[in-house]
Image (tube, helix red, strand yellow):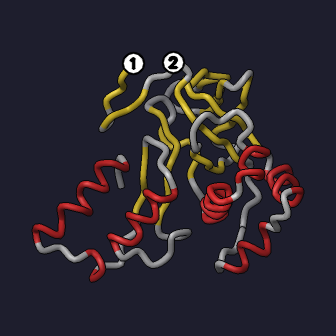
Amino acid sequence: CGYPPFIKDVIDEAEEHGIRWQQHNIKIVFAAETFSENFRDYIVRKAGIKNVYTDTMNIYGSAELGTMAEETPVSILIRRIMAQNNAAYKNIFTNARQFPTLVQFNPLFTNFESIEGNILCTGYNDLPLIRYAIGDRGSIIEFKEMVHVLKRNDIDIKYEANKVGIKNNAELPFVYIYERADLSTKLYGAIIYP
């Protein structure tokens, strides 16, 4: 579990120390940053991961609320489809300036809103946060709306999920995040401002 560039470094450099990832049944949880599906494919291949949908996951979290949302097998599938389907990508990720993180959330624990592209979250921690501006840009998509938009683009997500062996147990809403509102970026966990 960790920051994606760090995980890549560990996987790449482990071979020099005699670690053969293919001998282990590892699963990976990424945190803190979006990445491309090419990056995920690289990690899956290099680490000998068996199932890209169930053995990898990216989480969306913050210091204020901890883990707020996470990739699910169906959100990974949708994201991978979007990487190959430009029309559907534009219909779903309407404002994204870069390939976004797509995660699902349970609104009973943490709820998200998008006001003019700014993500607001409400959740409980030591101090409850109500409509807290997390500093990220993105949007919210209800599950049924996601299915509808995909269908308009000739994508039957239930068929696609069955094809790759995914069973969807929860029809939770999605949040996608594509950049920081202040245009900062992260490099190995350090926030760099323009």
Q: Give the tally of numbered discs.
A: 2
| Mark 2 neighbour density, 10 Å: few (under 14) some (14–19) many (20 or more) | few
Task: Tell me if 36 is positioned left or right of 164 in this view.
Answer: left
Which part of the image, by quadrant, shows the C terminus?
Answer: top left
Q: Quadrant of residue 177?
A: top right
How packed is label 1: few (under 14 Cα within 10 Å), some, or many (20 or more)?
A: few
Type of amino acid at the residue the image marks with label 2: Asp
Q: With 77 as the anchor, is 191 left or right in this view?
A: left
The label shown at residue 62 is none
Give percent across and percent down for residue 97. 61, 34
Q: In the rendering, at what x and y percent does residue 152 appear?
A: 89, 56
Is there CB contact under 8 Å for labels 2 and 1?
Answer: yes
Secondary-structure class at tag 1 = loop
Marks 2 and 1, Cα distance to the nearest angstrom? 8 Å
Q: In terms of secondary structure, where does tag 2 sit? A: loop
**Above or below 32: residue 53:** below
Q: Nearer the viewer, residue 47 or 115?
A: 47
Q: Position of residue 123 (x, y in %)?
A: 62, 33
Q: Quadrant of the N terminus?
A: bottom left
Give the residue at x 65% y 60%.
84
Residue assigned mark 2: 182
User: From this viewpoint, which residue is outermost toward the left?
Assistant: 17
Of residues 102 and 131, the one nearer the viewer is 102
Q: Is residue 116 above or below residue 78?
A: above
Q: Quadrant of residue 16?
A: bottom left
Question: Hey, what amino acid is under mark 1?
Answer: Tyr
The percent coordinates of residue 47 (x first, y second) are: 33, 71
Q: Residue at x 47, y 69 (%)?
A: 55
Position of residue 73 in the picture relative to residue 40 (left or right): right
Name the residue that disc number 1 marks: 193
Instruction: Tell me which numbered mark, 2 or 1, is placed earlier along the sequence.
Output: 2
Closest to the observer: 159 or 29?
159
